Amino acid sequence: MLATPRGRFHPGAALRHQYHRPSSAKVRASSILPQSRAAASMAGRLAAAPDGSANANGSAAPDRARGFYRDRIRRVAVSGGLRRSALFDHSQSGHSGSGYSNHSGASNSYPSNNSGISAAEPDFGAHELTVIAIQMVSDGYAQRMVREFCGGGGLENWFLELDVGWVLQIHNKTDLCQQLQLQLKSPSWLQDFVERWIRALMVTISSIVEALDKVQTLLLARFGKASISEMLVFVDAVIPLLKAGKLRAVLDMYICVCNASYMFTLDVFSLEAQIIFDEIRRSLGTERNKLRDAISTTVEEVRALMEDDDSWAIEFPQGGAGVHRNTRLMVGYIVSMTDALVSTRKSAPSHNTGNLHGLIDDTIKHLKDLLPRKSELCLDAGMRYLFLLNNSYFIATRDFIRGPYCGDSQHHQGLELTLECKDHMDSYLDVSWAHVISSISKSNPPGPLRRWMTNTSSLAKFESAFHQTYQAQKLWKVPDPQLKDALRRAIIERVISSYNDYLKKHPELAEHASRGNSTPAVLEEMLGQLFEG
Protein backbone atom coordinates (compact mmCIF):
# COMPACT_ATOMS: atom_id res chain seq x y z
CA MET A 1 0.00 0.00 0.00
CA LEU A 2 1.47 3.37 -0.98
CA ALA A 3 1.77 6.10 1.61
CA THR A 4 -0.55 9.08 1.30
CA PRO A 5 -0.75 12.12 3.56
CA ARG A 6 -3.86 12.42 5.67
CA GLY A 7 -4.13 16.18 5.54
CA ARG A 8 -0.93 16.79 7.52
CA PHE A 9 2.75 16.45 6.82
CA HIS A 10 5.66 18.38 8.33
CA PRO A 11 8.92 17.78 6.46
CA GLY A 12 10.60 20.06 9.00
CA ALA A 13 14.32 20.35 9.49
CA ALA A 14 16.24 23.18 7.87
CA LEU A 15 14.31 22.65 4.64
CA ARG A 16 10.75 22.99 5.91
CA HIS A 17 10.37 26.58 4.74
CA GLN A 18 11.45 25.62 1.20
CA TYR A 19 8.79 23.07 0.33
CA HIS A 20 5.66 21.26 1.46
CA ARG A 21 3.79 18.18 0.34
CA PRO A 22 0.29 18.79 -0.97
CA SER A 23 -2.60 17.12 0.80
CA SER A 24 -3.63 14.98 -2.18
CA ALA A 25 -4.16 11.31 -2.93
CA LYS A 26 -0.52 10.85 -3.77
CA VAL A 27 2.56 12.81 -2.79
CA ARG A 28 4.16 14.34 -5.86
CA ALA A 29 7.94 14.18 -5.94
CA SER A 30 8.06 17.40 -7.96
CA SER A 31 6.69 19.38 -4.99
CA ILE A 32 9.77 18.85 -2.84
CA LEU A 33 12.56 21.39 -2.65
CA PRO A 34 12.80 22.63 -6.25
CA GLN A 35 16.43 23.69 -5.95
CA SER A 36 17.47 20.34 -4.51
CA ARG A 37 15.44 18.46 -7.09
CA ALA A 38 16.96 20.43 -9.96
CA ALA A 39 20.44 19.69 -8.66
CA ALA A 40 19.56 16.03 -8.24
CA SER A 41 18.14 15.89 -11.75
CA MET A 42 21.34 17.29 -13.21
CA ALA A 43 23.39 14.77 -11.25
CA GLY A 44 21.10 12.04 -12.57
CA ARG A 45 22.13 12.80 -16.13
CA LEU A 46 25.50 11.25 -15.47
CA ALA A 47 25.57 8.16 -17.68
CA ALA A 48 25.56 4.69 -16.13
CA ALA A 49 24.48 1.25 -17.23
CA PRO A 50 20.93 0.30 -16.13
CA ASP A 51 20.44 -2.67 -13.86
CA GLY A 52 16.88 -3.36 -14.93
CA SER A 53 15.18 -1.78 -11.91
CA ALA A 54 12.94 1.24 -12.28
CA ASN A 55 13.56 4.69 -10.87
CA ALA A 56 10.98 7.20 -9.70
CA ASN A 57 10.07 8.13 -13.27
CA GLY A 58 9.51 4.54 -14.34
CA SER A 59 12.62 4.41 -16.49
CA ALA A 60 15.62 2.19 -15.93
CA ALA A 61 17.53 3.19 -12.79
CA PRO A 62 21.23 3.86 -13.29
CA ASP A 63 23.60 1.39 -11.72
CA ARG A 64 25.94 3.69 -9.83
CA ALA A 65 29.40 2.46 -9.00
CA ARG A 66 29.80 1.52 -5.35
CA GLY A 67 30.80 4.59 -3.39
CA PHE A 68 29.19 7.06 -5.83
CA TYR A 69 26.86 8.52 -3.20
CA ARG A 70 29.37 8.01 -0.39
CA ASP A 71 31.92 10.22 -2.12
CA ARG A 72 29.36 12.99 -2.47
CA ILE A 73 28.20 12.61 1.13
CA ARG A 74 31.74 12.89 2.46
CA ARG A 75 32.21 16.28 0.80
CA VAL A 76 29.33 17.92 2.69
CA ALA A 77 30.37 20.12 5.64
CA VAL A 78 27.93 19.62 8.50
CA SER A 79 29.71 21.04 11.54
CA GLY A 80 29.00 24.45 13.02
CA GLY A 81 32.66 24.54 14.02
CA LEU A 82 33.76 23.97 10.41
CA ARG A 83 31.58 26.85 9.35
CA ARG A 84 33.67 29.16 11.55
CA SER A 85 37.10 27.55 11.67
CA ALA A 86 38.50 29.25 8.57
CA LEU A 87 38.02 32.60 10.25
CA PHE A 88 40.26 31.59 13.14
CA ASP A 89 43.22 29.80 11.60
CA HIS A 90 45.26 32.98 11.88
CA SER A 91 44.80 33.24 15.64
CA GLN A 92 46.01 29.80 16.75
CA SER A 93 48.97 31.36 18.48
CA GLY A 94 48.50 29.96 21.95
CA HIS A 95 48.74 33.42 23.53
CA SER A 96 45.79 34.72 25.41
CA GLY A 97 46.50 38.27 24.44
CA SER A 98 46.96 37.76 20.73
CA GLY A 99 45.58 40.49 18.52
CA TYR A 100 42.08 40.44 17.22
CA SER A 101 39.65 42.70 15.46
CA ASN A 102 36.29 41.03 14.92
CA HIS A 103 37.58 37.51 15.56
CA SER A 104 38.61 35.62 18.63
CA GLY A 105 41.53 33.27 18.97
CA ALA A 106 42.49 30.50 21.34
CA SER A 107 45.39 28.38 22.35
CA ASN A 108 45.91 25.07 20.61
CA SER A 109 44.32 23.33 23.59
CA TYR A 110 41.07 25.16 23.10
CA PRO A 111 38.59 25.18 20.25
CA SER A 112 38.51 28.33 18.17
CA ASN A 113 35.30 30.04 17.18
CA ASN A 114 34.29 33.19 15.47
CA SER A 115 33.03 35.30 18.31
CA GLY A 116 31.84 38.02 15.98
CA ILE A 117 29.63 35.83 13.84
CA SER A 118 25.95 36.58 13.79
CA ALA A 119 23.42 33.81 14.20
CA ALA A 120 22.10 33.86 10.64
CA GLU A 121 20.28 30.67 9.69
CA PRO A 122 23.05 28.08 9.88
CA ASP A 123 22.34 25.29 7.36
CA PHE A 124 24.80 22.60 8.50
CA GLY A 125 24.75 20.84 5.12
CA ALA A 126 21.00 20.10 5.11
CA HIS A 127 20.42 21.32 1.56
CA GLU A 128 23.30 19.36 0.03
CA LEU A 129 22.40 16.17 1.88
CA THR A 130 18.79 16.49 0.74
CA VAL A 131 19.99 16.79 -2.86
CA ILE A 132 21.88 13.52 -2.43
CA ALA A 133 18.89 11.80 -0.80
CA ILE A 134 16.58 12.92 -3.60
CA GLN A 135 19.08 11.57 -6.13
CA MET A 136 19.20 8.22 -4.32
CA VAL A 137 15.43 7.91 -4.60
CA SER A 138 15.31 9.26 -8.15
CA ASP A 139 17.87 6.63 -9.16
CA GLY A 140 15.88 3.91 -7.40
CA TYR A 141 18.85 3.16 -5.16
CA ALA A 142 17.06 3.84 -1.89
CA GLN A 143 14.10 1.67 -2.92
CA ARG A 144 16.52 -1.12 -3.82
CA MET A 145 18.07 -0.89 -0.35
CA VAL A 146 14.58 -1.13 1.22
CA ARG A 147 13.79 -4.25 -0.77
CA GLU A 148 17.21 -5.74 0.01
CA PHE A 149 16.69 -5.25 3.74
CA CYS A 150 13.13 -6.57 3.75
CA GLY A 151 14.30 -9.58 1.74
CA GLY A 152 16.74 -10.49 4.49
CA GLY A 153 19.81 -8.82 3.01
CA GLY A 154 20.50 -6.58 6.00
CA LEU A 155 21.72 -2.99 6.11
CA GLU A 156 25.40 -3.47 5.27
CA ASN A 157 25.33 -2.03 1.75
CA TRP A 158 23.17 0.91 2.83
CA PHE A 159 25.41 1.84 5.76
CA LEU A 160 28.59 1.44 3.73
CA GLU A 161 27.24 3.86 1.13
CA LEU A 162 26.35 6.27 3.95
CA ASP A 163 29.98 6.06 5.19
CA VAL A 164 28.99 4.58 8.56
CA GLY A 165 29.62 0.88 8.02
CA TRP A 166 31.48 0.93 11.35
CA VAL A 167 28.14 1.34 13.17
CA LEU A 168 27.11 -2.18 12.16
CA GLN A 169 30.44 -3.61 13.27
CA ILE A 170 29.52 -2.81 16.87
CA HIS A 171 26.97 -5.02 18.57
CA ASN A 172 26.32 -2.84 21.61
CA LYS A 173 27.09 0.62 22.88
CA THR A 174 29.83 -0.63 25.20
CA ASP A 175 31.76 -2.04 22.26
CA LEU A 176 31.27 1.17 20.31
CA CYS A 177 32.52 3.23 23.24
CA GLN A 178 35.63 1.04 23.46
CA GLN A 179 36.28 1.32 19.73
CA LEU A 180 35.93 5.08 19.82
CA GLN A 181 38.26 5.39 22.80
CA LEU A 182 40.87 3.31 20.99
CA GLN A 183 40.74 5.55 17.96
CA LEU A 184 40.37 8.91 19.69
CA LYS A 185 44.06 9.77 19.59
CA SER A 186 43.20 13.40 18.94
CA PRO A 187 40.06 15.56 19.27
CA SER A 188 39.57 15.39 15.48
CA TRP A 189 38.76 11.66 15.67
CA LEU A 190 35.59 12.25 17.66
CA GLN A 191 34.51 15.13 15.46
CA ASP A 192 35.08 12.96 12.38
CA PHE A 193 32.85 10.20 13.76
CA VAL A 194 30.18 12.72 14.70
CA GLU A 195 30.17 14.38 11.28
CA ARG A 196 29.94 11.04 9.44
CA TRP A 197 27.07 10.04 11.71
CA ILE A 198 25.22 13.33 11.12
CA ARG A 199 25.52 13.00 7.35
CA ALA A 200 24.25 9.43 7.44
CA LEU A 201 21.27 10.17 9.67
CA MET A 202 20.17 13.18 7.61
CA VAL A 203 20.45 11.29 4.33
CA THR A 204 18.49 8.37 5.83
CA ILE A 205 15.72 10.65 7.09
CA SER A 206 15.53 12.62 3.84
CA SER A 207 15.49 9.42 1.77
CA ILE A 208 12.59 8.00 3.77
CA VAL A 209 10.61 11.22 3.39
CA GLU A 210 11.36 11.38 -0.35
CA ALA A 211 10.50 7.70 -0.92
CA LEU A 212 7.24 7.87 1.02
CA ASP A 213 5.06 7.39 -2.08
CA LYS A 214 7.53 5.32 -4.10
CA VAL A 215 7.75 2.11 -2.07
CA GLN A 216 5.34 0.13 0.07
CA THR A 217 4.80 2.17 3.24
CA LEU A 218 5.13 -0.67 5.73
CA LEU A 219 8.38 -1.89 4.17
CA LEU A 220 9.74 1.65 4.22
CA ALA A 221 8.74 2.07 7.86
CA ARG A 222 10.46 -1.18 8.89
CA PHE A 223 13.58 -0.21 6.96
CA GLY A 224 13.53 3.23 8.57
CA LYS A 225 13.13 1.84 12.08
CA ALA A 226 15.98 -0.65 11.65
CA SER A 227 18.32 1.96 10.14
CA ILE A 228 17.59 4.69 12.66
CA SER A 229 17.69 2.32 15.63
CA GLU A 230 21.19 1.24 14.62
CA MET A 231 22.22 4.88 14.20
CA LEU A 232 20.88 5.97 17.60
CA VAL A 233 23.11 3.48 19.42
CA PHE A 234 25.89 5.94 18.66
CA VAL A 235 24.26 8.65 20.81
CA ASP A 236 24.34 6.59 24.01
CA ALA A 237 27.87 5.43 23.25
CA VAL A 238 29.35 8.81 22.47
CA ILE A 239 27.81 10.92 25.27
CA PRO A 240 30.27 9.64 27.93
CA LEU A 241 33.11 10.80 25.67
CA LEU A 242 31.75 14.32 25.26
CA LYS A 243 33.85 16.01 27.91
CA ALA A 244 34.45 19.73 28.36
CA GLY A 245 36.38 20.20 25.14
CA LYS A 246 33.77 18.49 22.94
CA LEU A 247 30.79 20.83 23.18
CA ARG A 248 30.83 21.52 19.44
CA ALA A 249 30.33 17.82 18.70
CA VAL A 250 27.35 17.39 21.01
CA LEU A 251 25.75 20.59 19.71
CA ASP A 252 26.09 19.40 16.11
CA MET A 253 24.44 16.11 17.05
CA TYR A 254 21.68 17.93 18.93
CA ILE A 255 20.83 20.05 15.89
CA CYS A 256 20.75 16.97 13.68
CA VAL A 257 18.47 14.95 15.98
CA CYS A 258 16.13 17.93 16.49
CA ASN A 259 15.75 18.24 12.74
CA ALA A 260 15.27 14.51 12.28
CA SER A 261 12.68 14.33 15.04
CA TYR A 262 10.68 17.15 13.53
CA MET A 263 10.77 15.56 10.08
CA PHE A 264 9.04 12.49 11.46
CA THR A 265 5.76 14.26 12.08
CA LEU A 266 4.22 11.95 9.49
CA ASP A 267 0.65 10.84 8.79
CA VAL A 268 0.09 7.82 6.55
CA PHE A 269 -2.93 5.63 5.83
CA SER A 270 -1.23 2.41 6.90
CA LEU A 271 -1.93 2.07 10.64
CA GLU A 272 0.94 -0.36 11.19
CA ALA A 273 3.37 1.91 9.35
CA GLN A 274 2.03 4.91 11.29
CA ILE A 275 2.76 3.14 14.58
CA ILE A 276 6.34 2.48 13.45
CA PHE A 277 6.88 6.07 12.30
CA ASP A 278 5.58 7.31 15.67
CA GLU A 279 7.97 4.97 17.47
CA ILE A 280 10.87 6.34 15.42
CA ARG A 281 9.89 9.90 16.31
CA ARG A 282 9.67 9.07 20.01
CA SER A 283 13.08 7.42 19.88
CA LEU A 284 14.55 10.51 18.24
CA GLY A 285 12.91 12.68 20.89
CA THR A 286 14.44 10.56 23.65
CA GLU A 287 17.91 10.91 22.16
CA ARG A 288 17.36 14.63 21.63
CA ASN A 289 16.65 15.04 25.34
CA LYS A 290 19.78 13.06 26.23
CA LEU A 291 21.88 15.33 24.06
CA ARG A 292 20.27 18.41 25.57
CA ASP A 293 21.19 17.15 29.04
CA ALA A 294 24.71 16.39 27.80
CA ILE A 295 25.06 19.99 26.61
CA SER A 296 24.16 21.26 30.09
CA THR A 297 26.57 18.83 31.75
CA THR A 298 29.38 19.77 29.37
CA VAL A 299 28.91 23.49 29.98
CA GLU A 300 28.92 22.91 33.74
CA GLU A 301 32.20 21.02 33.37
CA VAL A 302 33.68 23.94 31.45
CA ARG A 303 32.64 26.36 34.18
CA ALA A 304 34.24 24.18 36.84
CA LEU A 305 37.48 23.96 34.85
CA MET A 306 37.55 27.73 34.52
CA GLU A 307 37.10 28.23 38.24
CA ASP A 308 40.08 25.99 39.02
CA ASP A 309 42.32 27.04 36.12
CA ASP A 310 45.74 28.23 37.33
CA SER A 311 46.37 30.16 34.14
CA TRP A 312 44.42 33.16 35.38
CA ALA A 313 47.21 34.36 37.65
CA ILE A 314 50.01 33.14 35.36
CA GLU A 315 48.77 34.87 32.24
CA PHE A 316 48.19 38.31 33.76
CA PRO A 317 51.83 39.39 33.39
CA GLN A 318 52.42 37.25 30.30
CA GLY A 319 49.26 38.33 28.53
CA GLY A 320 49.67 42.03 29.31
CA ALA A 321 46.02 42.33 30.42
CA GLY A 322 44.74 41.08 27.04
CA VAL A 323 41.69 38.93 26.38
CA HIS A 324 42.18 35.73 28.37
CA ARG A 325 42.00 32.38 26.59
CA ASN A 326 39.20 31.28 28.94
CA THR A 327 37.15 34.27 27.85
CA ARG A 328 37.70 33.30 24.23
CA LEU A 329 36.86 29.67 24.99
CA MET A 330 33.54 30.47 26.65
CA VAL A 331 32.64 33.04 24.00
CA GLY A 332 33.24 30.34 21.39
CA TYR A 333 30.92 27.98 23.25
CA ILE A 334 28.25 30.68 23.46
CA VAL A 335 28.53 31.14 19.68
CA SER A 336 28.07 27.39 19.16
CA MET A 337 25.05 27.27 21.47
CA THR A 338 23.56 30.31 19.75
CA ASP A 339 23.98 28.64 16.36
CA ALA A 340 22.25 25.53 17.70
CA LEU A 341 19.42 27.62 19.15
CA VAL A 342 18.85 29.51 15.90
CA SER A 343 19.02 26.35 13.80
CA THR A 344 16.53 24.41 15.91
CA ARG A 345 14.14 27.36 16.14
CA LYS A 346 14.07 27.73 12.36
CA SER A 347 14.06 24.06 11.40
CA ALA A 348 12.03 22.60 14.25
CA PRO A 349 9.94 25.44 15.71
CA SER A 350 7.65 23.12 17.65
CA HIS A 351 10.51 22.01 19.90
CA ASN A 352 10.98 23.79 23.21
CA THR A 353 14.32 25.59 23.04
CA GLY A 354 13.85 27.39 26.36
CA ASN A 355 16.43 25.23 28.14
CA LEU A 356 19.11 26.06 25.60
CA HIS A 357 18.23 29.76 25.68
CA GLY A 358 18.45 29.74 29.46
CA LEU A 359 21.79 27.95 29.34
CA ILE A 360 23.17 30.64 27.02
CA ASP A 361 21.99 33.41 29.36
CA ASP A 362 23.41 31.62 32.41
CA THR A 363 26.76 31.11 30.66
CA ILE A 364 27.02 34.79 29.77
CA LYS A 365 26.17 35.78 33.33
CA HIS A 366 28.65 33.29 34.77
CA LEU A 367 31.46 34.62 32.59
CA LYS A 368 30.68 38.23 33.46
CA ASP A 369 30.66 37.33 37.17
CA LEU A 370 33.84 35.27 36.90
CA LEU A 371 36.06 37.96 35.39
CA PRO A 372 35.99 40.42 38.34
CA ARG A 373 36.75 37.61 40.78
CA LYS A 374 39.68 36.31 38.76
CA SER A 375 41.00 39.83 38.13
CA GLU A 376 41.71 40.13 41.86
CA LEU A 377 44.61 37.73 41.33
CA CYS A 378 46.39 40.54 39.48
CA LEU A 379 48.59 42.54 41.86
CA ASP A 380 48.84 45.62 39.63
CA ALA A 381 45.63 47.65 39.95
CA GLY A 382 46.11 49.32 36.58
CA MET A 383 46.57 45.98 34.81
CA ARG A 384 43.58 44.58 36.67
CA TYR A 385 41.21 47.24 35.37
CA LEU A 386 42.69 47.09 31.88
CA PHE A 387 42.11 43.32 31.90
CA LEU A 388 38.50 43.86 32.93
CA LEU A 389 38.06 46.50 30.22
CA ASN A 390 39.55 44.29 27.48
CA ASN A 391 37.56 41.19 28.40
CA SER A 392 34.28 42.98 29.11
CA TYR A 393 34.52 44.90 25.85
CA PHE A 394 35.31 41.67 23.98
CA ILE A 395 32.13 40.09 25.37
CA ALA A 396 29.93 43.15 24.95
CA THR A 397 30.83 43.67 21.30
CA ARG A 398 30.02 40.15 20.17
CA ASP A 399 26.89 40.06 18.00
CA PHE A 400 25.13 37.42 20.11
CA ILE A 401 25.55 39.17 23.48
CA ARG A 402 22.28 41.00 23.95
CA GLY A 403 19.68 41.24 26.65
CA PRO A 404 19.79 41.89 30.39
CA TYR A 405 23.50 41.21 30.89
CA CYS A 406 24.74 43.90 28.50
CA GLY A 407 23.23 46.85 30.29
CA ASP A 408 22.92 50.35 28.89
CA SER A 409 25.64 51.92 26.81
CA GLN A 410 26.96 55.41 26.14
CA HIS A 411 29.39 56.99 23.71
CA HIS A 412 32.85 57.73 25.01
CA GLN A 413 35.67 59.09 22.87
CA GLY A 414 33.55 58.25 19.82
CA LEU A 415 33.14 54.63 20.94
CA GLU A 416 29.94 53.05 22.25
CA LEU A 417 30.74 51.48 25.62
CA THR A 418 28.52 49.65 28.05
CA LEU A 419 28.33 51.30 31.44
CA GLU A 420 30.36 48.39 32.79
CA CYS A 421 33.16 49.02 30.28
CA LYS A 422 33.00 52.76 30.98
CA ASP A 423 33.44 52.07 34.70
CA HIS A 424 36.46 49.85 34.03
CA MET A 425 38.01 52.51 31.81
CA ASP A 426 37.50 55.23 34.41
CA SER A 427 38.95 53.01 37.14
CA TYR A 428 41.99 52.27 34.98
CA LEU A 429 42.56 55.99 34.33
CA ASP A 430 42.26 56.77 38.04
CA VAL A 431 44.68 54.15 39.33
CA SER A 432 47.20 54.51 36.48
CA TRP A 433 47.32 58.22 35.69
CA ALA A 434 45.74 60.21 38.54
CA HIS A 435 49.01 60.20 40.52
CA VAL A 436 50.84 61.54 37.47
CA ILE A 437 48.53 64.53 37.30
CA SER A 438 48.54 65.08 41.07
CA SER A 439 52.32 65.41 41.05
CA ILE A 440 51.92 68.82 39.43
CA SER A 441 51.75 71.05 42.50
CA LYS A 442 48.77 73.33 42.82
CA SER A 443 50.43 75.31 45.60
CA ASN A 444 51.71 78.82 45.02
CA PRO A 445 54.23 79.61 47.79
CA PRO A 446 55.29 83.25 48.32
CA GLY A 447 58.47 84.56 46.75
CA PRO A 448 59.70 84.03 43.19
CA LEU A 449 62.58 81.75 44.17
CA ARG A 450 60.47 79.48 46.28
CA ARG A 451 57.80 79.36 43.56
CA TRP A 452 60.45 78.47 40.95
CA MET A 453 61.94 75.73 43.09
CA THR A 454 58.52 74.30 43.96
CA ASN A 455 57.27 74.36 40.41
CA THR A 456 60.49 72.93 39.03
CA SER A 457 60.31 70.12 41.57
CA SER A 458 56.66 69.46 40.67
CA LEU A 459 57.51 69.38 36.98
CA ALA A 460 60.32 66.92 37.64
CA LYS A 461 57.97 64.73 39.66
CA PHE A 462 55.41 64.86 36.85
CA GLU A 463 57.98 63.94 34.22
CA SER A 464 59.31 61.09 36.37
CA ALA A 465 55.83 59.70 37.14
CA PHE A 466 54.79 60.01 33.50
CA HIS A 467 57.82 58.19 32.09
CA GLN A 468 57.65 55.51 34.78
CA THR A 469 53.98 54.78 34.03
CA TYR A 470 54.57 54.96 30.29
CA GLN A 471 57.45 52.48 30.38
CA ALA A 472 55.52 50.09 32.62
CA GLN A 473 52.44 50.05 30.40
CA LYS A 474 53.85 50.56 26.92
CA LEU A 475 53.67 46.85 26.11
CA TRP A 476 50.38 46.14 27.81
CA LYS A 477 47.71 44.93 25.40
CA VAL A 478 44.51 46.45 24.11
CA PRO A 479 43.89 44.17 21.13
CA ASP A 480 40.80 45.87 19.74
CA PRO A 481 41.91 48.81 17.54
CA GLN A 482 38.88 50.97 18.28
CA LEU A 483 39.13 50.45 22.02
CA LYS A 484 42.87 51.11 21.90
CA ASP A 485 42.34 54.39 20.08
CA ALA A 486 39.59 55.48 22.48
CA LEU A 487 41.69 54.66 25.54
CA ARG A 488 44.72 56.52 24.22
CA ARG A 489 42.59 59.59 23.55
CA ALA A 490 41.07 59.36 27.03
CA ILE A 491 44.57 59.33 28.59
CA ILE A 492 45.68 62.25 26.41
CA GLU A 493 42.60 64.23 27.34
CA ARG A 494 43.13 63.68 31.03
CA VAL A 495 46.93 63.95 31.27
CA ILE A 496 48.03 66.26 28.47
CA SER A 497 45.15 68.67 29.03
CA SER A 498 46.13 69.06 32.69
CA TYR A 499 49.78 69.44 31.70
CA ASN A 500 48.95 72.14 29.14
CA ASP A 501 46.91 74.03 31.74
CA TYR A 502 49.78 73.82 34.19
CA LEU A 503 52.32 75.21 31.70
CA LYS A 504 49.98 78.04 30.77
CA LYS A 505 49.81 79.06 34.42
CA HIS A 506 53.58 78.75 34.71
CA PRO A 507 55.04 79.97 31.40
CA GLU A 508 58.49 80.19 32.95
CA LEU A 509 58.53 76.35 32.99
CA ALA A 510 57.71 75.90 29.30
CA GLU A 511 61.32 76.47 28.28
CA HIS A 512 62.50 74.07 30.97
CA ALA A 513 60.09 71.42 29.70
CA SER A 514 61.30 72.00 26.16
CA ARG A 515 64.92 71.51 27.15
CA GLY A 516 64.00 68.27 28.87
CA ASN A 517 62.16 67.03 25.80
CA SER A 518 58.91 66.94 27.77
CA THR A 519 56.70 69.26 25.78
CA PRO A 520 52.99 68.36 25.60
CA ALA A 521 53.40 67.45 21.93
CA VAL A 522 56.21 65.00 22.67
CA LEU A 523 54.34 63.37 25.55
CA GLU A 524 51.16 63.13 23.47
CA GLU A 525 53.10 61.36 20.73
CA MET A 526 54.41 58.89 23.30
CA LEU A 527 50.92 58.18 24.60
CA GLY A 528 49.89 57.40 21.04
CA GLN A 529 52.29 54.44 21.19
CA LEU A 530 50.81 52.82 24.31
CA PHE A 531 49.45 49.25 24.36
CA GLU A 532 51.50 47.84 21.50
CA GLY A 533 52.23 44.56 23.27
Image (cartoon, helix red, strand yellow):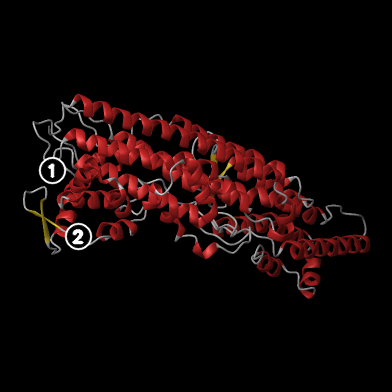
Position of residue 167 in the picture relative to residue 446 (left or right): left
- Between 475 and 435, the one lying in front of the other is 475
Secondary structure under the numbered disc 2 in the rendered image: loop
Q: Residue at the far left: name it.
A: 58
| Quadrant (top left/top right/bottom left/bottom right) for the C terminus | bottom right
Mark 2 is surrounded, within 10 Å at the Cα level, by few (under 14), some (14 to 19) or many (20 or more) other residues, namely some
**Residue furthest out toward the front:** 152
Whether residue 362 can be seen here: yes
Please, what is the three-letter code of the amino acid marked with disc 2? Arg
Residue at image coords 9%, 31%: 24
The x and y percentages for residue 346 are 33, 38
Q: Which residue is mark 1?
A: 29
Label located before the other in sequence (2 or 1) = 1
If the image is split into quadrants, where does the N terminus sit?
top left
Q: Position of residue 98 (x, y in %)?
A: 60, 61
Most extreme residue toward the bottom is 515
For the point 50% across and 32% down, the residue is 358
Asked whether the viewer can see residue 400, the reply is no
Spot occupied by residue 172 in the image (x, y as percentages of width and height): 45, 41
Q: Residue 258: give its label.
A: none
- The residue singled out by tag 2 in the image is 64
Residue type at mark 1: give it: Ala
